[in-house]
Image (tube, rainbow, N blue to C red):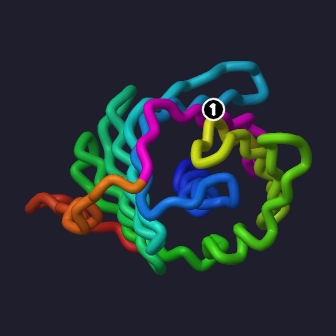
Amino acid sequence: MRLIGILLCLTTLLCAKIGDFKTIQSDFIQKVTNDQNKTIAYEGTFYATKEQKALWVYQKPVVKKIYFNQNKVLIVEPELEQVIVTTLQNTPNIAQLLREAKEVAPNRYITRFMDTTYTIVGSNDTIEKISYKDKLENNVEILFSNASTDLFIDDEMFRPDIPKGYDIVRE
């Protein structure tokens, strides 16, 4: 579940002041390092719109899709044959983060939400990296590459596809 919290905040952070776009698509590597210095790296592709829709498609080490809209998150986990549905009650909206993100050095921004400080590195319309320490004291770093902005992204992409027979878990 901590991965959900991480992604909730990151989805909204990607629209911070350093990028003014209608849509964004980017590859990502998300590294999570625990207090014993063990790291797990996730890889995939991220899509988002200014309308607060987002999709994280994980390809390695597990396959999963995480869909975001204005008020809920839906996680499709093929290996578990389940879908987790949760709300965004503890996640800031994009407007709040945009107002609160402060440039602290050239191409470096800081924002805070629910006792977590997020550092965003990027230039002009590109976000390069987001890093923070999660509530479990893991160091999280998300590196973005091959980003494209303002491309057409069909709204259908953000419509979850729930396979028949999957368990649906509501939180």
Q: Position of residue 126 (x, y in %)?
A: 58, 43
**Residue at position x 81%, y 68% in the image:** 100
In the image as oriented, which residue stretches furthest toward the front?
A: 124
Q: Is residue 98 left or right of residue 57?
A: right
The vertical placement of 154 against 147, above or below, is below
Main SS category, magenta section: strand
- The quadrant in which residue 66 appears is bottom left
Q: Quadrant of the N terminus?
A: bottom right
Residue 140 is covered by the magenta coloring: yes
Q: Is residue 82 left or right of residue 96?
A: left
Q: Residue furthest left?
A: 164
Q: Residue at x 61, y 43 (%)?
A: 127
Q: Residues within 10 Å of mark 1 (few under 14, many from 20)?
A: many
Looking at the image, which residue is at 62% across and 36% down?
128
Q: How many numbered marks does the figure carry?
A: 1
Considering depth in this image, is 34 or 129 the residue closer to the camera?
129
Q: Which residue is mark 1?
A: 32
Q: Position of residue 56 (x, y in %)?
A: 40, 49
Q: Is residue 155 left or right of residue 54?
A: left
**Is residue 10 something one can see in this rendering?**
yes
Q: Which residues are magenta?
A: 133-149
Determine if the magenta segment contains residue 97.
Answer: no
Image height of 44 relative to 18, above or below: above
Secondary structure found at label 1: strand
| x and y percentages locating residue 154 in the rendered image | 22, 62
Q: Nearer the viewer, residue 20 or 171?
A: 20
Specify the farthest residue to the right: 104
